[in-house]
Amino acid sequence: MLGDTAYKLAQETKRTQAHLTAYNESLVEQLCRETRHIFAQLEALLQKVNPALGRSVDTRAVAAQLAALHATAKRNKRCLLAYHHLRLQFLKSLFWSVGKIPDELKPQLSPQEQDFFSHYAVLVSQYKHPFVDIDLNASELPPRDLFIEVRVLKDCGEIQLEKGSLLLTRNSQHHVKRSDVEHLISQGLLQHIG
Amino acid sequence: MGDYYDIDDILADQQLNVDIPGLATDETRSNGDELQADTTIELPLWMAESLAANDFVELQLPRPYGSRMQRILYASCRNVNFHALCPYFYKFGLKLSLALDEPQLSELLADVYRQRLELVLDAAQRSDAQNMVEFISQLDETEKQTYAIAKKSTQAVRQWQKGDAKLLQSAEILTCFQSAPS
Amino acid sequence: MTSTKPTQQFTLPELEFLAEDTPITIIPTHRMDTLHFISGSYGPFQPPAHIEVPLWLARLLKTKRRCHIQAPTWLNCRFLERKYDEEQRQPDRFSNLPYQYLEIAHVLVTCAEDDIPQSHTIKRLIQDLREIRQSKARAGLAAVNPVYLQMDHLGAVELNEIRPVFCQAFNHLRKLEKDLGDYIVPSYEDTQSTTSYSNY
């Protein structure tokens, strides 16, 4: 039935809201193919009613078919765009809240999506360029103290601080400057404990 | 087209399939089957709307919105399982009411939503969420959204009062693809 | 974290932060010179003279044991009990409490418990007030019609709590009752496209 593939993708989009799954290349590909096929059908139908050919056809029936096919093509397009739009929204949010693509997420993204992420990062860094003193990625939680207490949840190796470096091994606890580790907390590597 | 990318709006278009009696001289073909005039078929709304716009077909209200159901809703809507009727009861109903030019349908829906709103908000503010599972499962998607928004809001206040809001948290988005760090 | 979309809500820590500009009277325990900040200069501090400072500074000095905080006139059992009675007597109205009563009370009972007489009873009273007002707000929301909604004397936290629900419900009703025009609450976020991602 016309529109079934699009419906499948729409349902997958709905599920993606709660949980991001791997980019469904085969379904996207299938839907694009179907839409190209519809386009070919549309062109053939239009030929039929071409008055130059002078054939007698029920133009009203052809018009109904044209309307049905056209609606399907538009529907397919809308479902495709919504699927990609939601995933791009996700990537943008990911950029602002985490700043990078976590390793375990990489296999879920298409190469184009990974490209998008890095291009988006470049765009934002160009935008940020004039405000060197303001960290646009900083946490919006109003600060209480300059220094905070953190526990390490995952090994992060050595990090560079304003003064020297610090080795972050799992389960160790540190008293550090908040602005130095904020990004590690949002990435889920450190836990803020006080 | 503010809702163009909205997945709920897209899914609402797919609901229930509107009954379509074909009209004389109209032969729509889908999947190669010839459709005779004056037959009644079900089509998804997005297709039906486009055919109706050109007067190829005439639309009829699907059963969950029919006069019998409307009478039930007028009498009492609090215990109706909307999720079973149509997961997008309001959104789809609104589209129908516009497509079929039946403004009283959307007015009925507005009344129904208002009456059920208090129950939804009540459930969202209760802390014994377990007892609410059945109630929630009977809500339509719009009501579920209302519930989720209200619950999130109330929980944020509770957390703050307990003193849990002053710590930096890991990004919420991480939960969309990974389990919480052990 | 910085989100790609502005949200409809303040976070609770943000509301608390805003409330910390409220002036409050302290009694310094140590002699100190005037303190200079971007937002202004406070002091000199000469115990036992009372002095008015913003709440954030009061909290800072209090945690460093350099002052006692004088509870605001409304933060006492008698006043709050009276307000609670008022809330009960008028089921469809909110009593007039300071706009930021929840935030200020929260800051003071957490950092200056020992300076506030009967702080435990106060905590309980504040909670009682919050609950009775919360159920009134809920009833008010359920009565929402697509034209207007009036709830006077709601506090900042309370308004912030109902704002997103109100916007969603109101816009939804607006769409259903079309003959009232196309006006949609200027929401900062298209509530119809609220996805789980838009909260970041």
Image (tube, coloured by chain):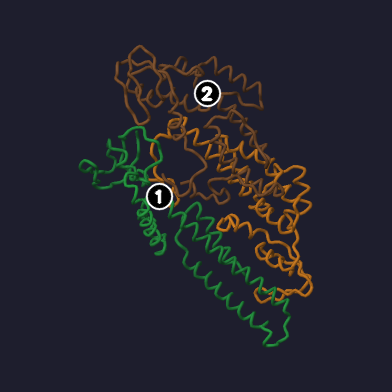
Chain colours: A green, B orange, C brown
Residue C102, position as x, y percentages in the image: 50, 27
Q: Which residue is mark 1?
A: A96
Q: What residue is shown at x 56% (from left), y 41% (from top)?
A: C164
What chain does badge 1 belong to? Answer: A
Q: What residue is shown at x 67% (from left), y 42% (from top)?
A: C146
Q: CA distance from mark 2 to mark 1?
A: 37 Å
Residue C51, position as x, y percentages in the image: 39, 17
Query: Do marks 2 and 1 both belong to one polypeptide chain?
Result: no
**Image: B109 above or below C24:** below
Q: Secondary structure at mark 1?
A: helix
**Image: A153 above or below C156:** below
Would you identify the image quadrant in which residue B118 lies? top right
Q: Which residue is mark 2?
A: C126
- In the image, C49 versus B158, the foreground residue is C49
Would you identify the image quadrant in which residue B110 lies? top right
- In the image, A152 versus C62, the foreground residue is C62
**Image: A19 above or below A55:** above
Q: Residues within 10 Å of mark 1 (few under 14, many from 20)?
A: many
- In the picture, the quarter occupied by the N terminus of chain A is bottom right
Q: Amino acid at mark 1?
A: Trp
